[in-house]
Image (spheres, helix red, strand yellow):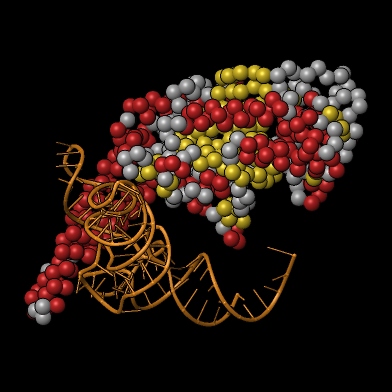
Amino acid sequence: MLQVSYIRDNREQVLERLAVKNFKQPELVDEIIGLDDKRRSTQTSMDTVSAEANAAAKQIGELMRAGKKAEAEEVKSKTGTWKEDIKKFAEQLAATEEELYQKLVLLPNLPHSSVPKGLTPEENEVVLENGAKPELPANALPHWELAAKYSLIDFELGVKITGAGFPVYKNKGAKLQRALINYFIDEAEKAGYSEVSVPLMVNKDSGFGTGQLPDKEGQMYFVNEDELYLIPTAEVPITNLYRDVILKGDDLPVKNCGHTPCFRREAGSYGAHVRGLNRLHQFDKVEIVQIAHPDKSYETLELMSAHVQGLLQNLGLPYRVLRLCGGDMGFGSALTYDMETWSAAQQRWLEVSSVSNFETFQSNRLKLRFRNAEGKTQLAHTLNGSALALPRIVATLLENNQTERGIKIPEVLVPYTKFEWID
RNA sequence: GGAGAGGUGUCUGAGUGGUCGAAAGAGCACGCCUGGAAAGUGUGUAUACUUCAAAAGGGUAUCGAGGGUUCGAAUCCCUCCCUCUCCGCCA
């Protein structure tokens, strides 16, 4: 959520930046400023009446104590319509604030100046490409066939016990999952992130805090009985650990990592392009989260991007880094890098990580602040990234590393899998 | 799930209708003292909104959350959330 004061002070710039994100309702900006004017004047009126009422109440108290009951009664009789006025103003204020909030949450974050214009994924900017695309034998198989051939993943069994998009991992498939998770966590810890293990369900406040609500309400599984949401990413519980927190200046940067399953309804996504592991309702992911000083957050974003790239390099996967264009970016992000691996058997790029700087968009809602050099509270910047999401990594590993003999496990993973081949 | 107790500032903790944004202590910050430190001592130490060109200052709100009673609520009433104790259940 953008700060109203920022919108007021930088109206032109806000409009210009929103255009980069192809925002369709620029008129909201002026509506917001208008509502904020109304909010302010209502608050001032209410405060004035409250001040009078408080002064009278205080006076009555003093007169009562002094035993001047008659005078007290006289003051009391003058209190008149204050109470009603205050109530009226309070209602008006609440209504205006609500209206303001409802409009404010419709504004996406402003994109960073380096974000390219554009509407579609095709207009994303390829920042770099790394690693050679492997030449596969003519009879190479896509990962869903490899998974069946080596008994690694059973999609039908998942359908039976839950539904489509909930695969069952078996044998070396299950072990590969566990190996990747441990490897990713270990690497994150080496990079200075401390591990947290967090709840997989969150309340409404948390959903709002990181911006999934109200924007992506329909994308999350919801447990009616207890009003809890299944997390779509560990970003939600981990970032919300710091909701309503004022950090000390030297606590920054805060670095956390964690592994969780992620649950996404992915409503309406069916068909060939979501086959196998390409798109699931439940998948595992290791997430890295940082809370950074505003002056350092873009430096931090580069470091996080480098960390993710390091993992892909160590796994020997060809990848590319995209700088997302305005139209393809998430609602709350100011700058996002997507990392994609080359799936050789499918002949397509698969997104395996998304690293974003949210600047103060989340922290404004979270009320996540730190005490700056002047001792004043200031909103911190939040960043997060997948490091990494498992299914498409598994898909690419299986496809790219298939040989006559079987599937070769990357060297860095062998200490974790304790086997070198899937055969 | 049942019965009871309770939720106050960074922490401990006082406060049962007016003098309470809140005693006292601890912690922390700065100063004095000291060769330096400890002890001692002095001062300060919430957040948000708003007013003001800005600073200073002023106003308003906040004692788990929301509502109510009252001229006036941390204090009384209602609803909800959470914590603790006992019982029940249980990986």
Q: Relative to A419, does residue B86 appear above or below in the rendering?
A: below
Camera-side residue: A32 or B44? B44
Q: Residue at x 40, y 38 (%)?
A: A2
How far from the left and from the top, in percent, is residue A362? 46, 41
Q: Residue at x 33, y 27 (%)?
A: A12
Horizontal relation, residue A40 to residue A356: left or right = left
How far from the left and from the top, in percent, is residue A309? 64, 27
Camera-side residue: B29 or B56? B29
Q: Is residue A274 visible?
A: no
Horizontal relation, residue B89 to residue A214: left or right = right
How far from the left and from the top, in percent, is residue A290? 52, 39
Q: Quadrant of the C terminus of chain A?
A: top right
Q: Is residue A81 visible?
A: yes
Q: Quadrant of the N terminus of chain A?
A: top left
Q: Residue at x 34, y 35 (%)?
A: A6
Residue A54: name its quadrant: bottom left
Residue A256: name its quadrant: top right
Horizontal relation, residue A79 to residue A160: left or right = left
How far from the left and from the top, in percent, is residue A55? 15, 64
Q: Residue at x 8, y 76 (%)?
A: A71
